[in-house]
Amino acid sequence: MVGLQRVQISKKQIKSLGLTTKQVAVFCQASTVYLDGEHVELSSHCLVLLMRSESAVQHCSRLSIGLMNELAAQGFMGSIRARLADDLILVPHLCFHTLPYSKNLLKILGGLMWTMPDFSHVILSKHRYLSCPDIEQVVILTLTGQNIVEKEMGLLRKVLRGDTAGQEEFELLALKWMPKLSRWQAQELSPFEVGEREWQSSVLSLMSTPALVFVLRRVRAFITLRRILSQSDPGNMCVLMSPTPETAFRQACLFFSEAELVPDHSSRPSLKFLAPPYTDTPGLRSQSLYSYMTEGPEPILTLALFKPGAWRHCFGKILSMIKQNGFTLVGLRILLLDSNMAQALILPPEQQNPTKRVLVMKYLRSGFSLALCLLRVNAVKRLLELMGPEDPVAACNEDQTPWWSHFCSDKLHSGIYGSLSYRKAVEDIKLIFPEGLCCTETSMMRHEQICCLCSDPEASSERELSDTLRTAVKDKFHSESGFSQGPLVSSNLCQTTCLLIPSNLMQQSQPPFYSEILERLLRTDCHLVAGRLCTPDENQRRHMSELLRPPADGAFHGSLLSEGPCLIIALQKDNAVPCLDILLESICRERPDFERIRTKLLYPNSESEAEKLMCYLFDISCPDSHHSIVPR
């Protein structure tokens, strides 16, 4: 082998290459396959090999047959057939097209196969290089020496196809054969630093042999490739990898132009968890691979729904877990699922036993659920990883404690749901949060037409004047369901009040002390009966400030209701209005470091103000609530 490159055959090149009509359908058109429940369009790029051998032209037909036999032996025939039309029979000439070499033919295919891009315009100091292993990372693998392919076939198979232990394979983005490395290229690839004893000899060694350079991508790419290469000799100059994201970017720019980086979606197990390119949205531009390497992927949304009975006792802990794992909370609702919502969150009828489906539907509608919309890089897959296996028994056998183990007691009452793919996440969010989310618009939101809230759509001055709090009459449906246990507080002394966590507390970095305060507060027989994340506008903030208790330091509470998302919750307890301040003081005596957080929490000063604020902010409370909001 003396050269290789990936090319996309154009209509002008078809005649010069002598492709038949059937070959054109295979070599020049991108096929679509069904992978993991998603329709995936594959690349239409072909691999061109320039080979030299005695009587090479005469042996071309035998070479094609031999390659087909090797593909069959390696188990590739099924995936190849999936890319062909149903009326095509798989024969060697549909996979391989051989031609005698000529300079004109090489020119038609794009010229010299080892041409280097112009690297001078890249200013490395302007970039930052993300090293988060949870996202897809790009790494460079370089093989050097004579007879590279023969010597390193086992390594290449392990990298590109995965290992026998079920390890995911790497996605091949680009590859290039270099007959000889320049001094600059050898210096860049050398694993030694300038000044080390082996530096000069390593550069000379690399300059004396050919090199085959691969650009690879997968989740935890550096960790995985380093583990694979650890089995070889550390001083082996024949197998080299870029040690850091910065080095990978530098080496990629040195050897490849951006047009040479071609995604292979069939080798991306994470594809269904990621946002598609924004090619069909005006004003949006798909992120390039080089931009991805320096800026990282854009954050995306996912839905986490905690089912009835699984969240109220650990609401503060849930908020802490969300924050500690790098998620940003952009939507929160406490809601009773209707039948359409419940059906959308369970398996399709063909994948579930009808009797179990009825029980699951009944359970989902038996009480209020906690719905969270979360924003994070690789949010969909990361949430599913944290949730762990749905089976509680399997979850207990995991190395890390999965979220399932905290929020379920059996498979029927598994307490948490997470969107299973990017597309399902978009559908779930539009269903559960139809009004929009409390965050700045992202490219994903614009592409998927998900709105950003600039005011609180549920706040109502009219309802504040027309409605009041009354002792609730229990819903017959929930009485008969067997899941609800009646009002959380049934005493005649029961009161309902509001607690507001302003934007400046919500946006604080770890640890989120406000969530720990909530956790301790809910252990004192305070019961959470309603809540949501909202973004009140200026008039709404001003009105709410009139009904809220001044903070402990006496500062004007209007300044604490700054622009941005804030969390509003309704709490119920005997004498809740006067006791809330006492309970918070008691918590701060145990944890003095919470005092600065307590001074920023906002709540009404009297029962009348609490009632007005409840009616202004909420139109419904949970079925276990002692009070309900009704017309006067």
Image (cartoon, grey):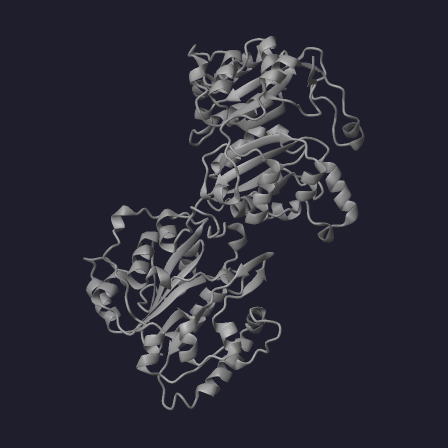
Query: Which image quadrant for residue 13?
Result: bottom left
Query: In percent of the image, x 65 and y 44: which residue is there?
Result: 392
- Viewer-nearest residue: 196 or 129: 129
Pick the quarter of the image with the N terminus: bottom left
Q: How many marks?
A: 0
How far across and how far down the image is residue 519, in percent? 56, 26
Taking the image as drawn, is residue 419 in sight? no
Q: Is residue 137 above or below residue 579?
A: below
Q: Residue at x 30, y 73 (%)?
A: 112
The quadrant holding residue 434 is top right
**381 vs 531: above or below:** below
Residue 400, percent across and down?
54, 45
Identify the residue at horizontal 47%, vertical 67% (top origin).
44
> What percent of the width, then of the height, locates residue 435?
57, 33
- Left or right? Give the position of 219 relative to 471: left
Residue 564, x across and y down, in percent: 45, 27
Nearest to the observer: residue 111 or residue 514: 111
Q: Is residue 519 positioned above or below 202 on the image?
A: above
Instruction: Judge from the rendering whether residue 191 lies leftward or rightward of residue 478; answer left or right.
Output: left
| Above or below 542: residue 50 | below
Image quarter in which the C terminus is found: top right
Q: Is residue 501 visible?
A: yes
> Camera-side residue: 508 or 92?
92
